[in-house]
Image (cartoon, helix red, strand yellow):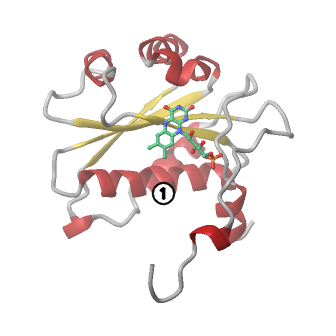
Amino acid sequence: MGTREIIKKRRSIREYKDKLISDEILLDLIDCGHMAPTARGEEPWEFIVIKNKETLKEISRLTNRNALFLKEASACIVIFSRPTKYYLEDCSAATENILLAATSYGIASCWIAGDKKDYVPDIKILLKAPSEYNLISIISLGYPKNDLITKAEKRPLDELLHWEKF
Ligand SMILES: Cc1cc2nc3c(=O)[nH]c(=O)nc-3n(C[C@H](O)[C@H](O)[C@H](O)COP(=O)(O)O)c2cc1C
């Protein structure tokens, strides 16, 4: 698949097969994540790969209704950041890189909110993250259970595209 095809194919998928993702692929997803653009070259990110079922279940429980599906995932990647000026932009770019790389492997994923959520302190304690770090995103990963997925509607281009001026 070419880059544009991968970008257009990626969707949030929340149902997964009971099939493991190899460490080689997980490592490559992090490699893709850390290649994201980063303001002033700061690379404020840290990535935690979680495969342990009990930990996945516990994060799913802590995130309440936001990510019930996480307990069925094969793995997740949690992105933490040092509190730099552009931490949110940097780590959002890294998150998207990982989502796209996962799509290229035929792996389903979903971005689960981190930043701004009231469950962040509990997850930081669970994962032993230093208190000054921000939790940006949790990415659930797994091979898709169904070929047919319900896709969220996108706004049509002619509604959001402006040429030259707003
Ligand atoms: C910052 C951010 C936070 C999100 N948080 C959640 C979440 O907590 N739980 C969830 O199920 N989906 C979450 N999503 C996924 C969105 O619901 C999804 O991207 C949106 O519905 C568009 O669908 P698509 O990803 O298939 O294009 C989040 C997406 C973003 C960008």
Q: Position of residue 104 (x, y in %)?
A: 68, 56
Which residue is labeled 1 in the image? 32
Residue 69: image quadrant is: top right
**144 horizontally vs 71: left or right:** right
Name the image quarter holding the C terminus.
bottom left
Q: Relative to 145, does residue 94 appear above or below in the rendering?
A: below
User: At 67% across and 53% down in the image, what residue appears?
Assistant: 10
User: At 29% across and 64% down in the image, what residue appears?
Assistant: 38
Dot 1: few (<14), some (14–19), or many (≥20) neighbours within 10 Å?
A: some
Kind of residue at disc 1: Cys
Q: Position of residue 105 (x, y in %)?
A: 69, 50
Name the image quarter holding the N terminus.
bottom right
**89 horizontally vs 95: left or right:** left
Q: Position of residue 62 (x, y in %)?
A: 41, 14
Task: Return the residue nearer the eye: 5 or 65.
Answer: 65
Q: Relative to 100, does residue 59 appear above or below in the rendering?
A: above
User: At 30% across and 25% down in the image, what residue appears?
Assistant: 120
Q: Position of residue 40 (x, y in %)?
A: 19, 69
User: At 65% across and 59% down in the image, what residue appears?
Assistant: 155
- Secondary structure under tag 1 reads helix
Q: Is the CB of mark 1 within 8 Å of ligand 1? A: no
Task: Return the residue nearer the eye: 30 or 44.
Answer: 44
Question: In the image as oriented, which residue stretches furthest toward the bottom?
Answer: 164
Quadrant containing ligand 1 = top right
